[in-house]
Amino acid sequence: MLDADAWLDSAMYEFWQSLGRGYTRLQDFFANFRVAGIRRFFVEILSDGLSFGAIGAVLMTALALPAFDATASGQFNRAEDISVIFLDRYGNEIGRRGIRSDDSVPLDKLPDYFIKATLATEDQHFYKHFGIDIFGTLRALMSNAQGDSSLQGGSSITQQLAKNLFLSNERTIERKIKEAFLSIWLETNYSKDEILKLYFDRAYMGGGNFGAAAAAEFYFGKKITDVTLAEAAMLAGLFKAPTKFAPHVDLAAARGRANVVLNRMVDAGFLTEGQVTAARRSPAVPVDRSFEINSPNYFLDWAFEETKKLIGDTDANSFVVRTTIDPVLQSYAEDAVTSVVREQGEQYRVSEAAMVVVEPNGAMRAMVGGMDYGKSQFNRAIVSNRQPGSAFKPFVYSTAFEMLPDYSPTTAISDRPVCIGNWCPQNYGRNYKGSVTLENAFAASINTVPVTLSIKTGREPIAATAHRMGITNDFPITRSLALGVASVSVLDMTSAYSVFANGGYKSPAFGITRITTLRGEPVWEMNPDAPRQRVLSERTVRYMNNMMRLVVTNGTGRRAQIEGVPASGKTGTTSDYRDAWFCGFTGNYVAAVWFGNDDFSKTNNLTGGLLPTIAWQKFMAYAHTNVEIKPVFGVDFQPAPFVIAATEEQAPLEPQAERPPVLQPAAARKLLDMADLLKQSLQDGRPGGQAVLAQPPRPATKESL
């Protein structure tokens, strides 16, 4: 044991000694590389650079994997590949949506100045970089930081093509990293000319056009090979912001952008100032598409999405869609909404509005999604992001009448402070009326009464009633649901109120009745005889229609009254005056109107009984002119009979005196000028001022005169 212990001690000693000697030799070896002073600084920088470079290489490889996965399938993003012609309810074309694409023109057939205009604007160093223009990116960042508003872009043509072919339009760091790797992949697998040709064919050029050839045909009515320098500059200006600079939307902006393109061509050395002078003096003139601007564009955008759902997996790619839109009512709705905002919007600090009009059976006759489609294509009529306020109360009262058979509009209920937990709602005037009937509470839009009813019925049945009637958006069931704290859309509110106008049957709004291919082959057709679902009992509908009639005659919606027309409805105002509504109906039409601001800012105390009700009444007054006034279910109102004047069959029609043609001032001035010239000519024909007329070879006839 002593020998073993001695051997172990000796071995351990020798091990540590040899380890120390090895470390000393290692120190002596590295001492040969020791540097000091300024050389040590550069060595440290190089060492750290190599370390971080290795880490970065591993990280970039990990980030590149998703980008390379995008190329694994060998397929590009599928562009929108259907084209739709929309017809109104009478069969007249009202607009088109979908793709217009043309990739049949080879790169070498494109005008040289169009290619140069694109390169000068989008990527001057396209033929020199490896897919990423580093200097161009830095220059764009500096230009944008200095406040240059000329849309200086940092992405090369290859990067833009990578986004179009493989990625989405989301603005994230991850997408930019993928875009960079995919650009390098494109440069590796395609030639520069192939990349440029793909870019010209796949870029979105506004107006539903993909590719320069389709855009030239759409904007100028000619082939891309025939465009002038001015037209080429305007087309090249569309790549960066096609919606903003589309000439059929804003011609002044399009021409301003084209002038920027011409400046870039001169700066890049592609053309001289003298060569672009003619293009500056004679800017491009697009074909007239004002009829498309006046189309019901918000409705067409919505109908296009609905069409894509209905056609399914049909092999055809061009369709004709018959819609329910009435052009006259559409113009009435647009005028009613826009005129009210323009006249009184500044006073109430409100800038946007939306309206949807349907018949009681759900057939949509008009849709207004905003004040100006050219400035904003955001459709405020279909987005479920607004609270309806008191316009939601009909769902509460309807649920109470359905679940509490002893309740009627004349049932008395106490208007007093009520709380659910620590939430205690207050009335608009912060006062209480004591005992009040349900119909008076509804007409005065008292808040405590629907909250009391929600306690009696439960809030889940109220939400279920709203969904059954037409509210499609899911919303949280909170204590304040009875006061309209739920996200809804104008379209859904119109559908829901149609139940009241339709006698209690569900009437979801629809805008398409038939879809065919261009050859007339049927694809889809609405069944007018489809069974209807009863949502509310006749008793409940009768109660609610009379209560909403009282809102218009004696309540918060008095501005909605139309002489000779039975109108019913409900106002709605949200907290802080962010949203104002009026939803109502007659026997002929149902309409919901919303006023507010896109940034959810407060209005100047705007309530549903003000501008929304005024716009609703203005439209309905137009719409009920010279039409048969239909009664409202359950409302005791007898419309005036609709009389069509008739004449006796055998009575001869007496000729009516016609007004003689009116001589316009300009024509009168021309006649006077001609008389003066003739008089002067006669005076110059003979001394003394006597006129001499040349005798005709034959007597003048009536025909010759």
Image: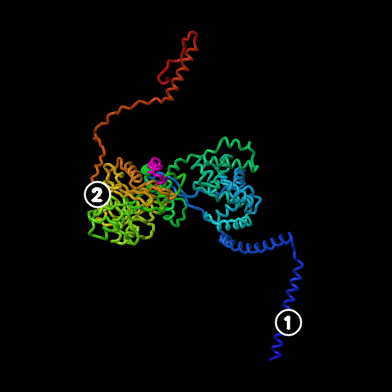
Looking at the image, residue 483 sits to the left or right of residue 71; the answer is left
Q: In the image shown, does 538 or 480 lie closer to the viewer?
A: 480
Amino acid carrying label 2: it is Val
Looking at the image, residue 519 sits to the left or right of residue 12; the answer is left
Q: Could you tell me which residue is drawn at 28 percent across and 50 percent down?
A: 444
Amino acid carrying label 1: it is Glu
Which range of residues does the magenta coloring cover?
337-353
Quarter of image, res 626: top left
Quarter of image, res 699: top left
Q: Position of residue 133 (x, y in %)?
A: 63, 52
Q: In the image shown, does 244 or 76 lie closer to the viewer?
A: 244
Prevalent SS, magenta region: helix
Residue located farthest toward the top when viewing the structure as drawn: 688
Badge 1 or badge 2: first in the primary sequence:
1
Per the model, the C-alpha gap separating discs 1 and 2 is 111 Å
In this figure, which residue is indicated by the disc labeled 2? 635
Q: Could you tell me which residue is drawn at 70 percent across and 89 percent down?
A: 4
Q: In what quadrant of the picture does the C terminus appear?
A: top left
